[in-house]
């Protein structure tokens, strides 16, 4: 079923909006949310988008996220000194490119890897714009994916947004856990994805993880989408200690 889907071309010129934005705007959730609209939203699953967002759908980078959730998520990531990134399930490439470009504004991003079973034509063009970003069209349930983790890992952050099935989501979390300091899941509060929500609830119950969730809604008939962020406790403590030291050192 997934192999029958075809990604759309995206407008990589919109990347300039992220590269040129002032850092203080990228650190402000409201301003960042407005910028995400300018970058462009996806036009699949339109029943999940409120009418006032429809004019932003179907062009640009085709981000398949709620801006009010995704902006809060990105601002949190900006404080975690992320230097390497893996995204599982890139679709058209919007969230992969935006996350890669956003993180690069706050810390040198050594590597950014996108994975999807579906080929994504915009990724080769994006690689020419950002040589540190690479895309692999592989099945995450295969030995090839395990080899990729061994060859390219570890990663500071892994974002899982692939087939929203409980068994696959659980396996992907298990696959990447030893290679990731931070794991994020998409659709943790989506009414259509109870399996992902179950995996997320299990992560939230663990004492070795510090968890945040971003589930703000636009519509009353949901909930839809939602992002869960699970940070290994030692990694979170290190990041907060570093942030505190920087704050104390600032006149």
Image: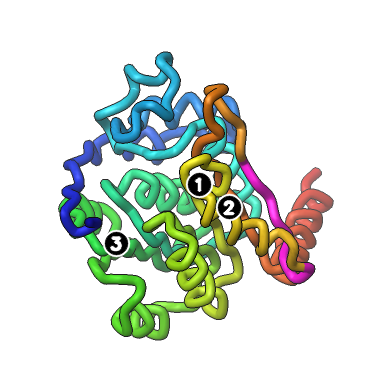
Give the percent coordinates (x, y) of residue 87: 41, 60
Determine which residue is flagged by label 3.
116
Sequence-first tag of 2 and 1? 1
Labels in figure, total: 3
Q: CA distance from mark 1 to mark 3?
A: 17 Å
Q: What whole-number distance in Å separates the C-alpha atoms at marks 2 and 1? A: 7 Å
Residue 108 visible: yes
Between the C-alphas of marks 2 and 3, the distance is 21 Å
Instruction: Determine the residue located farthest toward the top in the rendered image.
Output: 52
In percent of width and height, residue 78 lies at: 59, 49
Crowdedness of circle 3 by 10 Å Cα count: few (<14), some, many (20+)?
many
Mark 2, Cα crowd under 10 Å, few <14 / some 14-19 / many 20+, is: many
> What quarter of the picture does the C terminus occupy?
top right
Q: Residue at x 22, y 37 (%)?
A: 11
Place residue 128 in its image quadrant.
bottom left
The magenta-colored residue range is 207-214
- Choose mark 2 or mark 3, whichever is in front: 2
User: Label for residue 197?
Assistant: 2
- Do the CB atoms of the residues marked 2 and 1 lie less than 8 Å apart? yes
Residue closest to the far right: 248
Main SS of the magenta part reads strand
At 36% from the left edge and 65% from the top edge, which residue is drawn? 113
Q: Which quarter shows the N terminus?
A: bottom left
Does the residue at mark 1 contact the one at mark 3 (Cβ under 8 Å)? no
What residue is at 43 percent from the left and 67 percent from the top? 168
Write down the residue under mark 1.
187
Q: Nearer the viewer, residue 68 or 151?
A: 68
Secondary element under disc 2, as helix, strand or loop, is helix
């Amino acid at each position: 079923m997934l192999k029958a889907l075809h990604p759309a071309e995206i407008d990589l010129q919109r990347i300039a909006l992220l590269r040129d934005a002032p850092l203080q705007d990228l650190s402000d959730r409201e301003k960042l949310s407005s910028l995400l609209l300018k970058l462009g939203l996806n036009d699949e699953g339109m029943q999940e988008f409120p009418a006032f967002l429809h004019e932003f759908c179907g062009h640009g980078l085709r981000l398949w996220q709620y801006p009010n959730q995704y902006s809060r998520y990105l601002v949190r990531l900006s404080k975690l000194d992320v230097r390497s990134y893996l995204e599982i399930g890139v679709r058209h490439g919007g969230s992969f490119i935006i996350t890669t470009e956003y993180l690069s504004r706050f810390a040198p991003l050594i590597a950014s890897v996108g994975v999807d079973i579906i080929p994504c034509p915009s990724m080769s063009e994006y690689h020419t714009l950002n040589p540190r970003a690479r895309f692999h069209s592989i099945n995450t349930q295969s030995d090839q994916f395990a080899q990729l983790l061994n060859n390219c890992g570890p990663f500071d952050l892994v974002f899982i947004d692939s087939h929203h099935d409980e068994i696959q989501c659980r396996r992907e979390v298990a696959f990447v856990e030893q290679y990731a300091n931070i794991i994020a899941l998409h659709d943790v509060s989506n009414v259509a994805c109870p399996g992902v929500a179950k995996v997320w609830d299990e992560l939230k119950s663990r004492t070795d993880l510090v968890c945040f969730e971003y589930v703000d809604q636009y519509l009353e008939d949901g909930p839809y989408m939602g992002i869960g962020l699970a940070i290994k406790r030692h990694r979170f403590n290190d990041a907060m200690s570093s942030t505190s030291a920087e704050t104390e050192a600032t006149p």
